[in-house]
Image: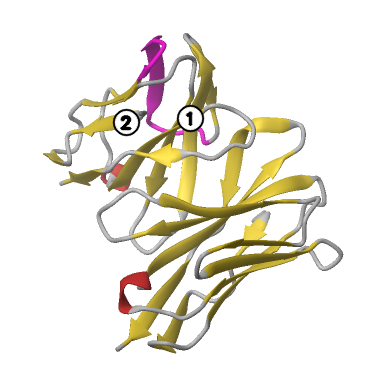
């Protein structure tokens, strides 16, 4: 049973436009959410996170939005750059199990120059 | 600053051979440690995690095992590799909540 879902395996966006990556989760106990970026043959790198007590968190070109009632979060990248082309993983932590994080399957973003 | 080392970067092994992948973390103490596998075109599958020396939790029953002989050392092993063990193996560490995990560069394992 996949608790963290990223239903779009891939996404293509023009350079300079907005990239929106979506993530849905099933467990209402999740209280901390993270986004990671991964280039081929490298380990994922932490990008941005959000606590369940917030509905928005910004860091430069990256903004994460959380809609707890819909169990949905999204990552916005504005403006998109070719270097943003990578696989993006959504992840979630459980309140009662801070020792592990559950990752989604990832969305491959291609930013076209 | 904290760093994580994972080696080797690439490994080609025959079916039935043993495996030992090592991961070490520097610059922090008592980290949580993790082993993940990413199969081709798939997401990250948590294999093992450890919250302390000698404490190993297994997420997926399989041909692999993990050990934590020292605080900042995490080892992934197998006695006999299967073809299905091929994949990209990642080690990660965190210091608890918020559970932001920091990953090593990964090991590409090909079992032939």
Q: Is residue B71 left or right of residue B107?
A: right
Judge the density around disc 2: few (<14), some (14-19), many (≥20) Cα neighbours within 10 Å.
Answer: some
Q: Which residues are magenta?
A: B60-73
| Callout 2: chain | B
Q: Is residue B39 above or below residue B56?
A: below
Foreground: A102 or A38?
Answer: A38
Q: Secondary structure at mark 2?
A: strand
Residue sitting at the far right = A69
Q: Secondary structure at mark 1?
A: strand
Q: Quadrant of residue B62?
A: top left
Q: CA distance from mark 1 to mark 2?
A: 17 Å
Between marks 1 and 2 in the image, the one whose residue lies nearer the viewer: 2
User: Which numbered circle lies on residue B48?
Assistant: 1
Viewer-nearest residue: B75 or B80: B75
State the image coordinates of residue B13 (x, y, percent, origin top left). 14, 38
Residue located farthest toward the front when viewing the structure as drawn: A60
Hey, which quadrant is residue A21 in on the image? bottom right
Dot 1, crowdedness within 10 Å: few (<14), some or many (≥20)? many
Give the letter of the chain under mark 1: B
Rendered image: mark on residue B4? 2
Sequence-earlier tag: 1 or 2: 2
Residue name at image x 36 percent, y 21 percent: B27
């Amino acid at each position: 049973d996949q608790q963290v879902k990223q239903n779009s395996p891939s996404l293509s966006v023009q350079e300079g436009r907005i990239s929106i990556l979506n993530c849905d989760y099933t467990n209402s106990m999740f209280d901390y959410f993270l986004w990671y970026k991964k280039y081929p043959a490298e380990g994922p790198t932490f990008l941005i996170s959000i606590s369940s007590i917030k509905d928005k968190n910004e860091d430069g070109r990256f903004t994460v939005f959380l809609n707890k009632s819909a169990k949905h979060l999204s990552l916005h990248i504005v403006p998109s750059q070719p270097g943003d082309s990578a696989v993006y993983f959504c992840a979630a932590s459980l309140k009662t199990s801070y020792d592990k994080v559950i990752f989604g399957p990832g969305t491959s973003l291609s930013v076209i120059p | 600053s904290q760093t994580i080392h994972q080696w080797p970067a690439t490994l080609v092994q025959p079916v039935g051979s043993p495996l030992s992948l090592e991961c070490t973390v520097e610059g922090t103490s008592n980290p949580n440690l993790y082993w993940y596998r990413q199969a081709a075109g798939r997401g990250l599958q948590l294999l093992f995690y450890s919250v302390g020396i000698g404490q190993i939790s297994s997420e997926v029953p399989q041909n692999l095992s993990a050990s934590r002989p020292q605080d900042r050392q995490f080892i992934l092993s197998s006695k006999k590799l299967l073809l299905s063990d091929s994949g990209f193996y990642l080690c990660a560490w965190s210091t608890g909540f918020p559970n932001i995990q920091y990953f090593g560069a990964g090991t590409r394992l090909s079992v032939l």
